[in-house]
Amino acid sequence: MRPFLAVLAVFIALPLLAQTSLIEQGRAAMNRNDPDAAAALLEKAVAQNPKSSEAHYLLGTAYGTQAQKASIFGQASLAGKTKDEFEKAVALDPNNLDARNGLVEFYTMAPGIIGGSYEKAFAQVAEIKKRDPLMAHRSAAFIYTQQKKPVEARNEYLVEVREYPNSARAHIDVAVTYVLEKNFKAANDEFETALRVEPTYMPAYFRIGQGAVLTSSNYAKGEEALRKYLTYTPKSGEPPLARAHYWLGQIFEKQGKKAEAKASFQASLKLNPSQKDVAEALKRVS
């Protein structure tokens, strides 16, 4: 009887395993910047398990990426589908903060005629704050940035650092605002602080390498940091390896090392062929 039960258990698990595989394949397609393939895979995942909050969220992300490349007429339809999937994800799991943040971005970026609303965006921030105050500061800062309110955005990040001084991500968030303001010294100080408080926070290494290019300094340190990041598998929302190869190529290019720069740019394009800035950089060193 036991062999029969074992076989039965395998058959019961097959749909879940198949759906998990589809989700991972869809995620991989998104990582290589292929939203069309991702959407097709994730639509199948949702069909197999309509109650999967993660599948709905990822499908919404794929639709949102498709919308960015669509015609004006296609954008409205895809934007609506994006919002619908994020809302379904949140309804299925109110603690799916990635989906809630997806709604923050949708409500902030979308025109009012297709559902955009700062009020609704901040309502999602309030829900996020109940569950993850650190993330809520970042979400609010995003809204302020889109509203062209840099002071309010910066204040969110400064409060974030004050409340969570031992969070590497908090220091990275502040550093990025300094980069946008071209205050590279202050940005580098925050990157260094991020590593000091949390040495295993890998995105800090990416930012240090990027900072070396933007400041045209500390190339050896920047190269070392990016090489370290390239040994890592980025999580969702973290800088992709394609960009790490790009910034490493920039470091080589600035030092006149054309062969090394060319190899790095080629490695970047192999991971994501649609990067126009990398293609242009490759032409410069070829």
Image (cartoon, grey):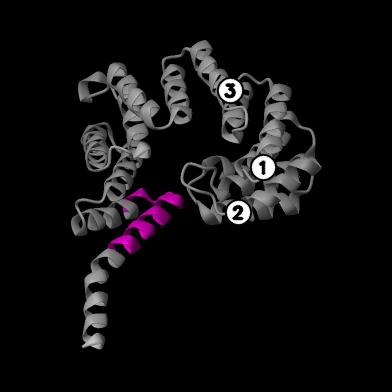
Q: Which amino acid type is marked by label 2?
A: Tyr
Residue with the mark numbered 3:
177
Front in this rendered view, residue 161 or 184: 161
Residue most extreme to the front: 1
Which residue bears the numbered disc 1?
A: 205
Q: Which residue is mark 2?
A: 232
Disc 3 crowd rating (10 Å Cα; few below 14, some 14-19, many 20+) is some
Residue 85 seen anywhere in this rendered image of the structure: yes
Residue nearer the viewer, 109 or 57: 57
SS of the residue at dot 1? Answer: helix
Q: Earlier in the sequence, mark 2 or mark 3?
A: 3
The image quadrant that residue 278 belongs to is top right
**Which is nearer the eye, 183 or 190?**
190
The residues tagged by marks 2 and 3 sit, at their Cα atoms, a distance apart of: 25 Å
The kind of residue tagged 3 is Thr
Q: In the image, what residue type sits under mark 1? A: Tyr
